[in-house]
């Protein structure tokens, strides 16, 4: 037990030290893999994918079991506490349980509620008449808050990666932009769930009207529907705005407004951060060019011979290559 990072107190209660436990390091990798699945699939389950007993459903059940086990483990994992003497690890089992119940327990508990299983076990017609049940499934996204616990994993990855911090930050913001685009695409598809097909017009009706000779309509194909929503979200985020897809009822108008606000803020933040990172990537090159400009100005002011100028430039260029 001690080799695995467990501590056994006098009361024979196993406590896990997150700084010394190889088991917890491996378990965190499993949780991050589960979170990656949730980040991509859970929004699609809510808005686009049909509810059936397929491979995605069973994988989701496995993910729910993973988070349930993680919830149990949190009652045994030490946490940092602050005191007037500094920061220390809390090893008291009762204090660990109270701390977890006050912080992450509610979110973790909601994230393991099997909404998919409940909707499948319920009569389909009754669920169809109560579409708000599907909106509750959006709470599955709360599983993403557990990604904050993966900081220690990123520290281990940082020790093994040769990539610079600038490139790592650039990759991070690029992934964030992709995730935001994916979530907003599913949010736009969710309007078709919130608004029943019938008397109320929907944005998909205009597309369906242009598909008279198409065998598989966009509204009947999960792939086509997702690509259409992704297309709408992409030009909304980038402020292109072709206008071929637009809200036609109050629910779509509200969601489109929310998407525009989120997309505008996200695009501004990510674009600003990326521009700063890209500019920082060429910092050494900018300093070298400034040095060469000063060298050329100095040689011109002192009217140095062309051969001396050439040798000085060659020296600085060779020194640049040697310092890489």
Image (spheres, rainbow, N blue to C red):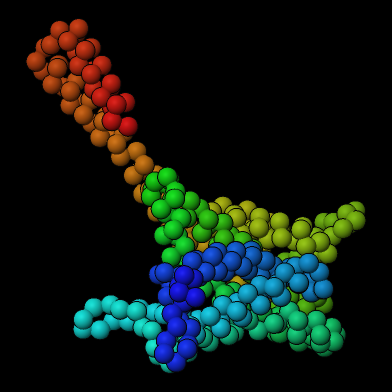
x and y, in percent, of residue 228 in the image: 71, 57
Q: Against 135, is 229 above or below?
A: above
Is 67 left or right of 158, judged from the image as shown? right
Q: Position of residue 230 (x, y in %)?
A: 66, 58
Picture quadrant where residue 219 is located: bottom right
Look at 60% across and 64% down and name the residue there.
33
Residue furthest left in the image: 302
Asked where in the image residue 181 lies, by quadrant, the reply is bottom right
Q: Is residue 293 above or below residue 15?
A: above
Horizontal side of residue 230 vs 1, given as left or right: right
Q: Nearer the viewer, residue 167 or 266?
A: 167
Q: Nearer the viewer, residue 300 or 157?
A: 157
Q: Nearer the viewer, residue 31 or 42?
A: 31
Q: Residue at x 75, y 68 (%)?
A: 56
Please state the horizontal and vertical placement of residue 164, each as a whole percent of the image.
Answer: 39, 46
Indicate the quadrant containing the C terminus: top left, top right, bottom left or bottom right: top left
The percent coordinates of residue 269 (x first, y second) are 42, 59
- Count of numbered tags: 0
Q: Is residue 120 left or right of residue 94?
A: right
């Amino acid at each position: 037990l001690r080799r695995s990072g467990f501590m056994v107190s006098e009361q024979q209660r196993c406590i896990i030290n997150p700084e010394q436990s190889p088991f917890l390091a491996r378990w965190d990798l499993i949780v991050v893999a589960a979170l990656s699945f949730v980040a991509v699939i859970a929004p699609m389950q809510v808005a686009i994918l049909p509810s059936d007993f397929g491979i995605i459903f069973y994988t989701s059940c496995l993910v729910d079991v993973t988070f349930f086990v993680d919830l149990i483990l949190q009652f045994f994992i030490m946490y940092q506490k602050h005191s007037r003497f500094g920061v220390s690890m809390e090893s008291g089992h009762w204090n660990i349980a109270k701390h977890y119940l006050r912080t992450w327990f509610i979110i973790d508990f909601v994230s393991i509620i099997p909404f998919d299983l409940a909707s499948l076990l319920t009569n389909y017609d009754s669920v169809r008449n109560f579409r708000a049940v599907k909106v509750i499934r959006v709470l599955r996204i709360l599983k993403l808050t557990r990604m904050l616990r993966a900081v220690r994993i990123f520290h281990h990855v940082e020790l093994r990666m040769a990539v610079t911090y600038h490139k790592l930050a650039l990759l991070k913001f690029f992934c964030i932009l992709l995730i935001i685009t994916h979530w907003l695409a599913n949010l736009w598809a969710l309007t078709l769930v919130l608004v029943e097909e019938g008397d109320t017009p929907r944005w998909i009706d205009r597309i369906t009207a242009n598909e008279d000779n198409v065998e598989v309509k966009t509204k009947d194909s999960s792939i086509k529907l997702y690509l259409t929503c992704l297309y709408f979200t992409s030009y909304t985020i980038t402020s292109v705005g072709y206008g071929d897809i637009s809200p036609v009822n109050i629910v779509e108008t509200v969601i489109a407004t929310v998407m525009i606000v989120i997309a505008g803020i996200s695009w501004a933040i990510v674009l600003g951060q990326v521009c700063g990172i890209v500019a920082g990537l060429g910092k050494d090159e900018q300093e070298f060019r400034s040095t060469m400009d000063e060298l050329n100005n100095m040689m011109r002011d002192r009217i140095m011979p062309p051969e001396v100028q050439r040798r000085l430039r060659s020296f600085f260029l060779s020194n640049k290559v040697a310092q890489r």
